Image (cartoon, grey):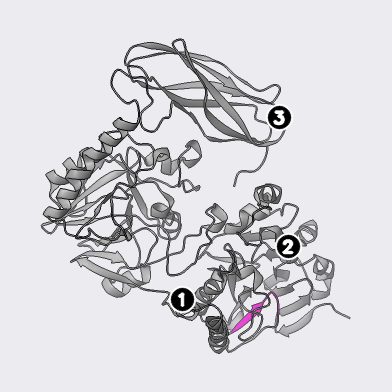
Amino acid sequence: MSHWNLLEDGVYLHRDSCNVYAVRGPDGQWLIINAGTGRAAACLPELGEVREVTVLLTHHFRDHTAGAEAFRRRGAHICAPYGEREHLSDPQQAFRSCEHWLLYDLAWDHFAPIEPVAVERWMRDYEKTVLAGLPVEVIPAPGVTLGAVAYAVELAGKRKITFVGELMSGPGRLARLAPLQYQYNDLLGGENVLLSWDRVLAVNPVAAFPSLGEPFGEIRAAVAQLRKNLERFDTIHPGYAARLAEPSSPGIEEVLPRLYRARKTVAETHFIIGRSGRVLALDYGYDMAGIRFPGRAKFSTRRTLLHSVEALRKHTGASRIDTVLASHYHDDHIGGVHLLQRLFGTELWAGENFADLLEHPADYDRPCLWPEPLRVTRRLPLGETVHWEDVAITLYPMVGHTEFSTLLCLEFDGHRVAHTGDQIFYQTAQGINIAPPAAGGVFTNHVYKNGLALGGYVDCLRRLRAFQPEIILSGHALPYRPDEHTWALFERTAPAFDDIHRALMPLGDEQMHFGPESQPAKLQPYNLHLPAGKTTVRLRGWVLNPFNHNVTADLRFTTPPAGWQAAPIRLTLAPREKKPFETTLTVTSEARRRQPIALDLTVGERPFGQVAEAWVTVGYDRF
């Protein structure tokens, strides 16, 4: 008796801790969807000729993934969603970072596999490929986990079916609601499920195969029933139905001829349409209409989806985004660029003062870093005008919200448009506003660990005054036209920033200080990785002279594990000089995760202690 049930020609089901599906490809190739406990691996010969097997995992829950090793031992290739790497590649570290006490974050991290899954290939969102001789498309499908995907598989005769994980267990029903509660008493995951179904329906499948429950057709009717059932939560969670009804594609709106704004993104995204029809995006981060985020911010809970491309096509005829001009390095502004580069070969232009953070994020100890290195096509010089088609672009260094930012000054068709990044917001007693209020003040939005210096807001005001923009764009506000009230707010706030810090901190020319950031030194790379077998690596960084006279600085390194060491350094520093340094770190071959090392600084006769640190990982895979 076979352990496989034939569902339709070439598609089989093995019932395990989850549904394990087998799809026949040509020449003895088989596609297996999810692994369950692994019992199905021993039953593969019952399918007939089995020459090559590829296992596709939909999400990280261990009732779906724990059996992957059993398939791998039989020669199967294991593929899994890219967004699930944290829980599949290094579950011990994922468990180590899980909270147990005072827990209000309810994501099902505890249901990850307890041993690593040997994933051979990470499946990327929107990827179209051929596996086991069958065309496969990866559909972003957050729901029970934020990294989950669905797979559309094309069978003979162009018949397309979808393997949807836990997006539904049958018409109108979900196998379990608990994983959809990301935070204490919410149901954000239910919103994500419906938004994911929009993307599944867009590929026009004829049948859906869930990982828990029963396969079904008439998919649109099933989704409509699911929506109705979820809307019933409005009885006990007032307002929930309205959130479910929100359109998933809010589109774009015109700001000026050729200048558009995405209607719903976490950080504002704008588009300039070139005379050729090409598209220049000003930043490109998270979609806020197509996905709901848990409150906890980490890589496994932040996912970028493709947005605005279809709206651009409808409004302008453009089918891709050709170039992104970044205002600064923060993830909510550039987190979607990796998608554009992979799907369209999009160029990334960035100011020379922060391009390295985009290309080498692991080197830096700064907030809001997107962990994937991005290809910077063009590093733009500051203070010089460059052109993208007929758009004149001048970038100026902008210090305030972050040291690694630029003021964008754009000119086209006789219009002057400035982009102030996240430098400035407007605030009243009611909170932060999206445009200058009739009364109230400027919220400087300064973040010390982003790096900042005195004079940044005064300089930004001076640049804006000189440029005289018709429209000001920013990272989290509607476009607005500055008026005399706007300029008066700027004039009052910019010098106040410096005055307040000088009143509170010893920042005078004759005083010892490390600036308002209070950072004497940094080590780079901050997140340092040595693969197994490598025992030496270059360690670099910078150190700042806190005095207004020449000094000698002694740098020593505290490396706790026995056998680890880095050579000490002596530097001569000019007044207030920020000077780079370099040494060699030697480690033992013993595997370690995130072992901290520290820089101990003495300037002249004054000790400052361990002023900077770096994390060193030896032997574990980087992800």
- Is residue 209 a member of the stretch shown in magenta? yes
Q: Amino acid at mark 2?
A: Arg
User: Would you say 274 lies left or right of 194 here?
Assistant: left
Mark 2–mark 1 distance (CA, rounded to whole Å): 31 Å
Q: Which residue is mark 2?
A: 62
Q: Secondary structure at mark 2?
A: helix
Q: Amino acid at mark 1?
A: Arg
Sequence-first tag of 2 and 3: 2
Q: Quadrant of residue 154?
A: bottom right
Mark 1–mark 3 distance (CA, rounded to whole Å): 52 Å
The residue lying toward the viewer, choosing from 76 and 272, is 272
Q: Amino acid at mark 3?
A: Ser
Number of numbered markers: 3
Q: Which residue is mark 1?
A: 243
- Residue drawn at (58%, 87%) of the image: 222
Q: Quadrant of residue 37?
A: bottom right
Sequence-first tag of 1 and 3: 1
Which contiguous range is marked in magenta?
207-213
**What is the x, y in percent for residue 491?**
17, 44
Q: Is residue 486 above or below residue 51?
A: above
Q: Which residue is mark 3?
A: 589
**What is the x, y in percent for residue 406?**
29, 44
Mark nearer the viewer, 1 or 3: 1
- Residue drawn at (61%, 84%) of the image: 207
Image mark for residue 318 = none
- Residue drawn at (80%, 56%) of the image: 73
- Residue drawn at (61%, 32%) of the image: 596
Q: Point out the image quarter for the N terminus.
A: bottom right
Mark nearer the viewer, 2 or 1: 1
Q: Secondary structure at mark 3?
A: loop
**What is the x, y in percent for residue 395?**
24, 43
- Is residue 71 a member of the stretch shown in magenta? no
